[in-house]
Image (tube, rainbow, N blue to C red):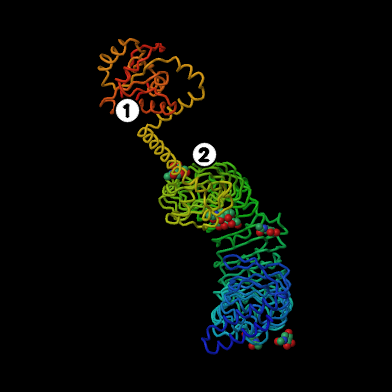
Amino acid sequence: MQMRHFRLMFSASLQKQHTSSRMKVPLALCICFSLTLTLTQTSERPTCNDCDEDHFCNCRAKDLHGVPIVPDDVLYLDVSFNEIESITQRDLTCYTELRNLKLQKNKLSTIHKEAFHSQSKLEALDLSFNNLKNISSQWFSNLRSLKHLNILGNQYTTLGSIALFQFVENPALRTLQFGNLWIRDVKQNLLRNIRQLDELSFVGGVLRSYENGSFQTIQPIRAVSVSLSRLFQDDPALVSKILRDVSHPETSLTIRDVSLETQELIEPLREVTEGGTRSLTFQNIITTDEAVSRLLEVLDGSPVSYIGLEDICLIGQGWWEKAKRTHLENLHTIHVRNIEIQGFFKFSSMIQLAFLLKHLTKISVINCTVFVIPCLTSCFLKKVEYLDLSQNLLSDITMQESLCNGDSKMRNINTLNVSHNSLKSLQLMSHLVTSLDRLTSLDMSHNNFVKMPQSCSWPASLRFMNLSTTKLHRVTPCLPLSLTVLDLSQNFLTEFHLHLPNLAELWLTGNRIIALPEGGHFPSLRMLFIQSNTLNMFNKSDLMAFQSLQVLEAGHNNFFCSCDFVEFFQGSIDHLITLGDGHRSYMCDSPFTLRGLNIDTAQPPVFECYMILLVSVICSVTVIGVIAIGVTCHKFHILWYLQMMIAWLKAKSKPSVQMAALLFDTMLFVSYSQHDAQWVEEILVPELKSSESPLALCLHQRDFLPGRWIADNIIESIESSYRTLFVLSENFVTSEWCRYELNFSHFRIIDERNDSAVPDPARAHRQGDDSQALLQTAQNNELQDVPRVA
Ligand SMILES: *[C@@H]1O[C@H](CO)[C@@H](O)[C@H](O)[C@H]1NC(C)=O
Ligand SMILES: *[C@@H]1O[C@H](CO)[C@@H](O)[C@H](O)[C@H]1NC(C)=O
Ligand SMILES: *[C@@H]1O[C@H](CO)[C@@H](O)[C@H](O)[C@H]1NC(C)=O
Ligand SMILES: *[C@@H]1O[C@H](CO)[C@@H](O)[C@H](O)[C@H]1NC(C)=O
Ligand SMILES: *[C@@H]1O[C@H](CO)[C@@H](O)[C@H](O)[C@H]1NC(C)=O
Ligand SMILES: *[C@@H]1O[C@H](CO)[C@@H](O)[C@H](O)[C@H]1NC(C)=O
């Protein structure tokens, strides 16, 4: 059912295509094909989910037997090291955006001629080391953007007589690698059409024929590498033909994977001299003193200015003086790397090579077990400007010899590289180079200095110094003020407090530094690299302190994602500075809840971020609330009512005692305003006292306990009095305390349903009962209308 439905859709879309724009055809087809694939081929085609946000799908070494299904917008697809045997017409149809396709080291034996037809944007294709027996130029007919093609290895024995890119009008090809151990012929047409090639690599150990001009393009190829191994022995004439085509002043030539042990094998290299080659490299070669001498003779008078020797096994001791009458004035640069010398221990002095050394300006002898350059030899290096002795066995003592104990004749030297050796004394190094007054660049990385002396002497010309991986724990003023670039990465530094006014680049990667160095000390600093330290955070003012800083790389630190830092990082850091390593490498280390999160996406808890705000809001709300309650209480006399309630509740909970107390109460509480005091004292009190049964009177002025709260006094007095007499006057009504007294007494009337209040002086006078003074206190008390607690 599903399939039929799909077919209907398919034909519908095809019909539509006739009427609608042509541009939509591939898209519709593609959608349809992916439908087909999901409907019919899911079981056959594997999937690969290792794709990242850059549309890079890494499906390397996954035991795949077919081209996997990946997202349609893939740009970079690596399916190398799998078991894929064929590529069908449809396998790649959907991946129209593909730029880079790696298919090397599979078992490819068939590729459909239209397999790459939708990859018009493909720039790099690697088909090397498969089982392809034929290379078809039809594969490439639509690869208009292809720049890099690698078809090394495989089992083809010829590429045929047609051009690889015969169907492409203007091939973009820049690098081509081809050939294998079986290829028998190279035909003239091979590179036809190609205008300019930057790099050509060819492997052809059993070649039988090579047509003149096959390796020639309209413009000379920039770099050619040929691996012809046994051909030097088997067919020197063929080698000459090839070398003739690739020798050109603008072409740097690499000859690799060959054993050049006798003089005769060197003969084809005459073509190199004749072609005017200036840059010649040998790679992976076994050779002898004899062959080297012959080579130098063959190059006599040639314009060659650069000789490279990489991965060389020399059977000999450096006796090349047979060639000492040669003219190699043009030879300025020798680059030697990974050389293994069988007569190594006899290879100590190179005085016999003076004829060669005296012209050199650039020498690199890297990873060659050099442990000393005798001072005598270094005397010939008067012209040398660049000396790289990295990855060797130099020690303090042999360094002393090599630089003639500080009196070296290499006065033109501007770059010295002694990285990856066994040097221990920075003090000695500074002493040895101090007279080299043109030295600008000194690389001493990967040595074992451990300590930095307090002061050193360096040539004033020194600008660049590399002290990375030298086990330093501390920096001192030993470092020269003239430096513009300083690399101190991969040490054990915990701080960096120096003033280096000219420094423009500072590398502190891989140390244990907790805070950014103080910006004020580096007024010229433009780039700061401080990744993989233990930085907690930094802020705007830290960065602003650097007057000239443009680029900062500080990823992979132990950032504490506080609210301030996160806000600064997400908000304003990009306006201040360029983060050279991108936001992605900045992760939170603490607090624990945010660990491992990118700072860009981290959200510290709201409470923490706005803690001060929250606390102040809560505090002010509380204060306002308290004030409001206070005002309300004051306004509506709530406290007093509460007191009253409590007093009454108390009274009710102890009825027997209270009742007993009251029963014997014959006291009269007189409630009056302070303004009526005169009247009360002069008229009312004598009047009441002079009646036939004088009453005990409770007067606030006299009987209230000092120091107690007025409300308490009132309550107690009313409670303990048999009656309360109110002196109702204008003053009474305006007095707050009098109103309390009235209220309280009403309360008592209602509560006890008795008649304890006498609202009228006249009535009180009539009702006067025998009373007995129960109250002991008789002290004067200055009661006022104002509430008072004291
Ligand atoms: C493949 O190459 C072989 C020779 O190596 C040749 O005989 C054969 O015809 C070629 N096949 C195709 C399809 O080109
Ligand atoms: C190739 O060039 C060489 C020398 O220029 C010449 O001797 C030889 O005949 C040429 N071969 C062909 C097939 O053109
Ligand atoms: C140094 O050279 C030796 C052979 O001489 C080689 O095995 C080794 O891999 C080289 N080391 C580096 C770092 O290139
Ligand atoms: C010095 O040599 C090391 C190792 O060979 C290399 O990594 C470094 O770039 C060189 N330094 C300079 C300044 O060329
Ligand atoms: C310093 O030397 C190390 C190791 O040789 C190298 O990786 C680094 O790039 C050098 N630093 C600079 C600034 O060239
Ligand atoms: C920035 O951080 C430094 C410590 O790194 C601190 O001394 C300074 O007060 C901070 N400045 C601001 C504005 O937070």
Picture coordinates of residue 164, whole percent (x, y):
62, 83
- Does residue 532 sit above or below 37 in this rendering? above
The quarter of the picture where the N terminus appears is bottom right
Give the label on residue 745, or none: none
Q: Quadrant of residue 94?
A: bottom right
Ligand 4 resides in the quarter of the picture at bottom right
Q: Earlier in the sequence, mark 2 or mark 1?
A: 2
Q: Quadrant of residue 87?
A: bottom right
Mark 1, residue position: 736
Q: Is residue 273 left or right of residue 696?
A: right
Comparing 469 with 203, the one in front is: 469
Q: Is residue 577 visible?
A: yes
- Secondary structure under tag 1 reads helix
Q: Amino acid at mark 1?
A: Glu
Comparing 376 with 725, the one in front is: 725
Q: CA distance from mark 2 to mark 1?
A: 85 Å
How crowded pointer 2 is (Cα within 10 Å; few <14, some 14-19, many 20+) is rated as few
* Residue for point 50% across, 18% down: 657
- Does residue 76 sit above or below 365 in this rendering? below
- Does residue 553 sit above or below 714 in this rendering? below
Q: Is residue 777 left or right of residue 464?
A: left
Q: Mark 2 or mark 1: which is in front?
A: 1
Q: Amino acid at mark 2?
A: Gln
- Secondary structure under tag 2 reads loop
Picture coordinates of residue 347, whole percent (x, y):
68, 56
Picture coordinates of residue 153, whole percent (x, y):
70, 75
Mark 2, residue position: 454
Q: Is residue 388 visible?
A: no
